[in-house]
Each structure stands twice: as structure tokens, then as C-alpha cells.
């Protein structure tokens, strides 16, 4: 596919001279007196600015995820940071628009609102299915980004790679696939197809299957021109030093998350089996993620009852398309047991 993402970027971003940080112009060899950045000279472990380009971290991420370094953006405020940056790079406030599926992850809409970008929502079809033609029809010349979360939050289902490819071939503008929950899915990732589709951007996070939500590390994988624009538009030191070090340490110590993922999928299956037998449960939607969307006769009452019993779930009853539903994260076997016990009472 011949496609130049820079043609879709805002002119001010294309013309941007990025802020040049203290350590940009120099590799660091042979320096014993760092007198360039007005830091404190007293070594307390955190007195120096971190690497603004996260070179070491990107090498580790590149190897683990099988993506070239020049296609990687790393955000220090989770993948939420990448979501907001993409809005700012591609969409002219008050003029451009984005297309999303509905229901989906709420931050796309919030970030668009903050940036004064129109949101065109295209409801999912029967069984939360992807409506490719409707998504394509919703887009016009001012549509810069189409957002598809797969597996989708809060519905839990993933879309097939074949469907996502078909959308990538037809859609105007860039297609962002948010793969926050992809490790729990058997439907595969769009990551290996980035070279074939330069209009696709894949979002990943360490907050879910990799168990590092507190470290706030998110990633975007994209055409090098997009990764470059994100690097130019980000805050200079957007990933703090302790996070860079700790993430490198953890990714190297535990590159394989298959055992944790297998436990959670087995627990998800157990809940999928048991929940339909509970009185008041109307439907358990199929899930490719680490949570279940469950429809109840009286979701608000169940939510309150669970809360009183010490289990907090996400009430999605007022989200259009999810009426009657609670979204329940798969926990440890003990936590899931508590959930089932409370529901059965
Ligand atoms: N995408 C989806 C679909 C999510 O559900 C979440 C978090 N709930 C995120 C992105 C953001 O994750 P983080 O900012 O922790 O990387």
C-alpha cells in the first residue's frame, strides 16, 4: 500500500522544530562533569534527567515485540498519552473529526473533546460486530483517525485480523487499533502487518497482561514518520527514569507472560461457565479479554450488593449499547470465588 501518513498531519506539526533537550545533541561518552542541564549535582539516584528518547528501553521493547526501533513511541502516562498525542498530531481543532465504534473505551471521546475534535460514533452491530461499511461511510475528507479497540472495552470481543485488514484497506485517514487486551485474545495482532499497512497504528500497554499499570507505560507502533512526529510532539522527558529502569528490568526478568495469561483465561472460562447459572444473570457476553460484560436483571442493585460485600466492578448500565451490564475484571481465583459467592447469595 503506497501511503504517506505525513500528508494527513497538521501543518504546524509538519513544520515543528522540536524542543531540543540537554542530552539530545550528545551521546554521553567521556563526560564526568554534567554542567549542561541545571540539575542538582548531588547524586541521590534521581537527580539527573532521564533519556528523553528511551533508547535502552526501546531496544528491549523492539526485541520483545518484534518491531523496529524507529516504529516505536513510548508514553510515560500509559497508552492514554499516545491517544492524546495522535489527536493533536493529526486533527485540526474545530475542523477535523474522528470515527469510533460504540460502545468503546471512553478516553477517545474525552481526548477528542479536550482537543475540540468532532467524534462520529458508529454503533457495533448484532453481537457487537464490526460494521465496516458504516465506519467507512461515516468518514469524510476531514476524518483523520478511526479508532477500533480490539479486544474492545467494554464489550470484551476482538475483531478478526481479516476484518481489520479490510477496514484498513477501505478507510480514509489513519486506523488506530487499540490492542490493550490483545494478550488475552486468540484472534491475533495487527502488529506484524504494520509494514503492509502504513495507515495503521497499533497501541499497546504494559498495564494489563504485563501487570505494570502503576508504572504508566504505553506504546504506539506505527510508520516511522508517525513515530517521529509523536517523538517531536511529546513532552521532552515523558518517561521518568525510575520507570524506564524498572520496565527494562521487569521485561528482561519476565519476558514470557504466558503463565499469568493462561491462569486468567482459565479463570475467565470458569466465570463464563458459572455466571449464567446465577439467578439474575441474563447474559454473559463472549470475551477475548481479561474481563466479562455481564447483563443482569437489576444491574444497579447487583453493583451495590457487590460493593457492600467488598467487590468493586464497573457499572456500564448507563452506557448506550451496554444497558443492564456490569463489566467484571477477572481476578485471582480467590477474588473470583468471592464474586461468585456474593452473586449466589
Ligand atoms: N486502551 C484501552 C482499551 C483501555 O481499556 C485502557 C485502560 N483501561 C487503556 C487503553 C489505557 O491504558 P494505560 O493508559 O494504562 O496504558
Image (cartoon, rainbow, N blue to C red):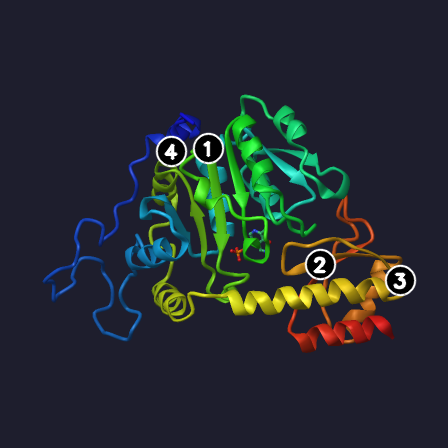
Element assignment for label 1? loop
Quadrant of the image for the N terminus? top left
Q: Give the image location of residue 96, x and y in percent.
A: 54, 28
Taking the image as shown, residue 72 lies to the left or right of residue 21, namely right
Q: Nearer the viewer, mark 4 or mark 3?
A: 3
| Upstream in sequence: badge 2 or badge 4 | 4
Element assignment for label 4? helix
> Mark 2 — residue?
292
> Mark 3 — residue?
280
Q: Is residue 218 visible?
A: yes
How far apart, in angstroms, are the residues tagged by discs 4 and 1? 18 Å
Residue sitting nearer the eye, 329 or 240: 329
Residue drawn at x 9%, y 62% as measured from the top left: 30
Residue drawn at x 30%, y 61% as measured from the top left: 50
> Mark 4 — residue?
13
* Number of numbered discs on residues: 4
> Mark 1 — residue?
199
Ligand 1 quadrant assignment = bottom right
Q: Is the CB of mark 1 within 8 Å of ligand 1?
A: no
Residue sitting nearer the eye, 45 or 194: 194
Element assignment for label 3? loop
Q: Which residue of the protein is positioned furthest toward the left in this rendering?
A: 30
Is disc 4 surrounded by few (<14), some (14 to 19) or many (20+) residues within 10 Å?
A: some
How far apart, in angstroms, are the residues tagged by discs 2 and 1? 31 Å
Taking the image as shown, residue 293 lies to the left or right of residue 109, namely right
Task: Determine contact: label 2, label 1, CB under 8 Å.
Answer: no
Q: Give the image location of residue 275, x and y in percent.
A: 80, 64
| Upstream in sequence: badge 2 or badge 1 | 1
Q: Give the image location of residue 170, x and y in percent.
A: 55, 26
Task: Determine contact: label 3, label 2, CB under 8 Å.
Answer: no
Residue drawn at x 75%, y 43% as measured from the top left: 127
Amino acid at each position: 500500500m503506497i501511503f504517506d501518513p505525513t500528508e494527513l498531519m497538521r501543518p504546524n506539526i509538519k513544520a515543528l522544530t522540536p524542543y531540543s533537550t540537554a542530552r539530545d545533541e550528545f551521546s554521553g561518552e567521556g563526560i564526568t562533569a554534567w554542567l549542561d542541564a541545571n540539575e542538582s549535582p548531588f547524586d541521590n539516584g534521581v537527580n539527573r534527567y532521564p533519556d528523553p528518547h528511551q533508547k535502552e528501553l526501546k531496544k528491549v521493547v523492539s526485541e520483545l515485540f518484534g518491531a523496529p526501533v524507529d516504529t516505536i513511541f513510548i508514553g510515560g502516562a500509559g497508552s492514554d498519552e499516545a491517544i492524546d498525542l495522535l489527536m493533536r498530531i493529526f486533527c485540526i481543532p474545530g475542523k477535523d473529526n474522528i470515527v469510533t465504534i460504540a460502545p468503546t473505551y471512553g478516553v477517545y471521546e474525552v481526548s477528542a473533546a479536550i482537543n475540540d475534535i468532532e467524534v462520529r460514533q458508529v454503533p457495533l452491530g448484532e453481537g457487537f460486530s464490526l460494521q465496516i461499511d458504516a465506519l467507512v461511510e461515516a468518514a469524510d475528507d476531514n476524518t483523520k483517525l478511526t479508532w477500533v479497540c480490539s479486544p474492545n472495552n467494554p464489550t470484551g470481543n476482538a475483531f478478526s485480523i481479516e476484518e481489520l485488514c479490510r477496514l484498513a484497506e477501505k478507510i480514509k485517514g489513519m486506523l488506530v487499533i487499540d490492542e490493550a487486551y490483545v494478550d488475552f485474545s486468540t484472534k491475533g495482532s495487527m502488529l506484524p502487518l504494520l509494514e503492509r499497512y502504513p495507515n495503521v497504528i497499533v497501541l499497546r500497554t504494559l498495564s494489563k497482561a504485563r501487570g505494570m499499570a502503576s508504572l504508566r507505560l504505553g506504546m504506539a507502533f506505527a510508520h516511522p514518520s508517525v513515530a517521529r512526529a509523536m517523538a517531536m510532539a511529546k513532552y521532552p522527558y515523558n518517561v521518568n527514569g525510575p520507570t524506564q529502569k524498572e520496565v527494562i528490568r521487569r521485561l528482561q526478568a519476565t519476558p514470557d507472560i504466558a503463565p499469568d495469561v493462561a491462569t486468567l483465561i482459565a479463570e475467565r472460562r470458569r466465570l463464563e461457565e458459572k455466571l449464567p447459572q446465577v439467578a439474575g444473570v441474563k447474559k454473559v457476553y463472549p470475551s477475548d479479554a481479561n474481563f466479562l460484560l455481564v447483563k443482569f436483571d437489576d444491574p444497579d442493585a447487583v453493583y451495590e450488593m457487590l460493593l457492600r460485600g467488598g467487590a468493586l466492578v464497573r457499572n456500564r448500565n448507563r452506557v448506550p449499547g451496554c444497558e443492564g451490564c456490569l463489566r467484571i475484571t477477572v481476578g485471582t481465583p480467590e477474588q473470583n470465588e468471592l464474586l461468585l459467592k456474593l452473586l449466589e447469595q
